Image (tube, rainbow, N blue to C red):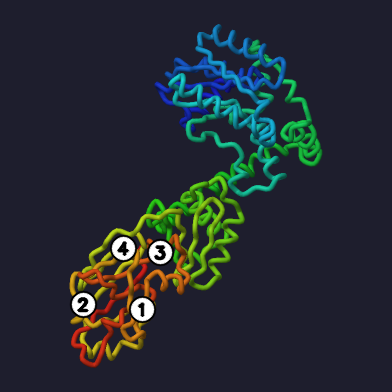
Amino acid sequence: MNFTEKVKNFILKHKLISPKDTILIGVSGGSDSMALLFALSSLREELAFSMFVCYVDHKLRPESKDEAVFVSQTSKKLGLPFILKELDMEKMKKQGSLEEIARIARYRALEEARIESNSNKIAVAHHLDDQIETVIMRIIRGTSIKGLRGIPIKNKNIIRPLMCVWREEILDFCRENNISYVIDSSNLSTTFTRNRIRLELLPKLAEYNPRIKEAILKIAVQAEELDEFLSYLENSFLEKYRGSEREFYVPIEDIKPLPNLLKRRIFMKILIDISPKPNEVREKSYEMIEYLLESSTGKELNLPGGAIAYRDHSGIRILREELESLPIYELNVPGVTIIDRLNKKVCIEIIDNDRYLREKLSNNLYTFYLDFDKIKLPIYLRSPKEGERFSPLGLEGKSKKLQDIMVDRKIPREYRGLYPVIVDSNGEIICIPEYTISEKVKVTDNTREILLVRIESYE
């Protein structure tokens, strides 16, 4: 099978290009991108797509202007429209690693060119040797299973049609088809980590295993398969724990038995999903969550990235800053009401004294007994209102500001808008779930019917 057929089969297998696609190809003028340019150009009619060519000039080397002209002239010979994007890397040099800054700037420029050309995909020329170098570089720096996958074949609108061929195959293709290309002098400099890996480390590793590249590629493929499997699992848990776009609730008894690897991935995925600044989520974020898992009720943490985690009796609530209040839920009496925002359900029964005396030990955090005759229906579950007061059981009718109760109970300020109260038809608080009932509706010797309220997790 020749080079172009191999690339075509790879494109079809992974559905990288569809009929009527418009592909913007990033071409630097080197052997890799020139091979990609000619291979895709020869497949245009067969696969029914159109193409644009883009050269990104970082202006870091004096020869880059000549390279831009070379790519432009080649594009013209192939009948392809050409776009030049010029960058001022001198202004960016102080922002961090030049290698990384240049990479980010290049992709940003390619995305601008994609929009300008009305293209729907960007093709770049990474190949299997690039994959090997990337995996090694990540191992050296420290990586996860996801990092061991290396460079993805496709990522959003970026496709990599040469991820089925080695560098030697690319050079052979250029030689056999008289494809001219330029040699980037920076590729020979050992200043850059990737170049040192290619020029120094890989030849040394080959002394221990002549097939070292194939061995590393096997690791990358297996890491990709494992990561896809774990992603499938974690996504199912995310949907289970999601309360809304701005909050998750993770029950302790549900998450604790899971393997540590899956547990970590679930929490990290939640934090990246919900944080206002997901790029700031770090491994330290999970370590803070681990602390919460072992903490007592009422602990609150502000996590890197802007999320807030709060430990209640049965789980961890992870919130985005500036949460919206709960909607008002009318509770079914008797019956079950789903409180979707909290992943809870409120189960209400009307029972007689005999059953009450048989079952009742004391009010607890999740089960409450109220004098039904003292309650004005309908009753509702909602967020607290500013300035509200409550008469907790045991204070003999004296009231306290709800704000003070929440401070005493160490309820985080950010969570208070989501902390539920149950009120009667007059708007008076008769019960605070996970706390207590109002003194005004307590069961006495004169009580005839009792409202049994149970708060349970809902899945």
* Residue of label 1: 436
Badge 4 element: strand
Q: Earlier in the sequence, mark 4 or mark 1?
A: 4
Task: Name the image quarter holding the N terminus.
Answer: top right
Q: Earlier in the sequence, mark 2 or mark 4?
A: 4
Badge 1 element: strand
* Residue of label 3: 416
Could you say which quadrant of the image residue 448 lies in?
A: bottom left
Query: Label 2: how many residues lie within 10 Å, few (<14), some (14-19) or many (20+)?
Result: some
Type of amino acid under label 2: Ile
Q: Is residue 230 visible?
A: no
Query: Do labels 2 and 1 touch, CB within 8 Å?
Result: no
Query: Do labels 3 and 2 touch, CB within 8 Å?
Result: no
Q: Earlier in the sequence, mark 3 or mark 1?
A: 3
Query: Label 3: how many residues lie within 10 Å, few (<14), some (14-19) or many (20+)?
Result: some
Relative to 142, say whether 2 is above or below. above
* Residue of label 4: 339
Instruction: Say whether residue 369 is left or right of residue 198.
Output: left
